[in-house]
Image (cartoon, rainbow, N blue to C red):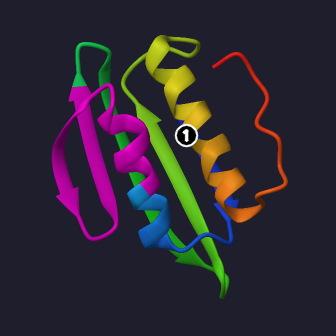
Amino acid sequence: MRYFHRTTVTPDAALAEAVRAFGRHLTPSEAAPRHRVFSGSLGTVTVRVRAEGGHYTLVTVTTDQPGESELDKLAKRFLGEVHVLAEPDHILRGAY
């Protein structure tokens, strides 16, 4: 599955949040300046960031699992946490 979110958070901050969010459940397996790969018993997730349209960052999360898997729930929660970084008043809702 592939998910994406456009945010005002910097690419470096989004990647730092990815390390925090996925590092609790998965092992980092690849790191580059604009992407991270995490893998474990749940599967593999890839997080890519790129500057887009001036001050925006496009965050793309790809998993190797079908939708609604445990890994996909973690991916969606991560994107919600990135939203909270950009807008601290945002209330993160959802059962993920």
Whether residue 20 appears in magenta in the rendering, the answer is yes
Q: At 37% from the left edge and 36% from the top edge, which residue is drawn? A: 22
Q: At 42% from the left edge and 71% from the top edge, which residue is drawn? A: 12
Residue holding disc 1: 78
Q: At 62% from the left edge and 45% from the top edge, which residue is drawn? A: 81
Whether residue 52 appears in magenta in the rendering, the answer is no
- Residue 29 point in image, percent of width and height: 15, 41
Q: Give the range drawn in magenta.
A: 17-39
Specify the quadrant of the image occupied by residue 94. top right
What quarter of the picture does the C terminus occupy? top right
Specify the quadrant of the image occupied by residue 7. bottom right
**Residue kind at label 1, given as amino acid type:** Phe
Q: Nearer the viewer, residue 13 or 36?
A: 13
Q: Judge whether 5 appears above or below 78 on screen.
A: below
Q: Judge whether 73 appears above or below 9 on screen.
A: above
Q: At 36% from the left edge and 24% from the top edge, which residue is drawn? A: 64
Residue most toward the bottom?
A: 54
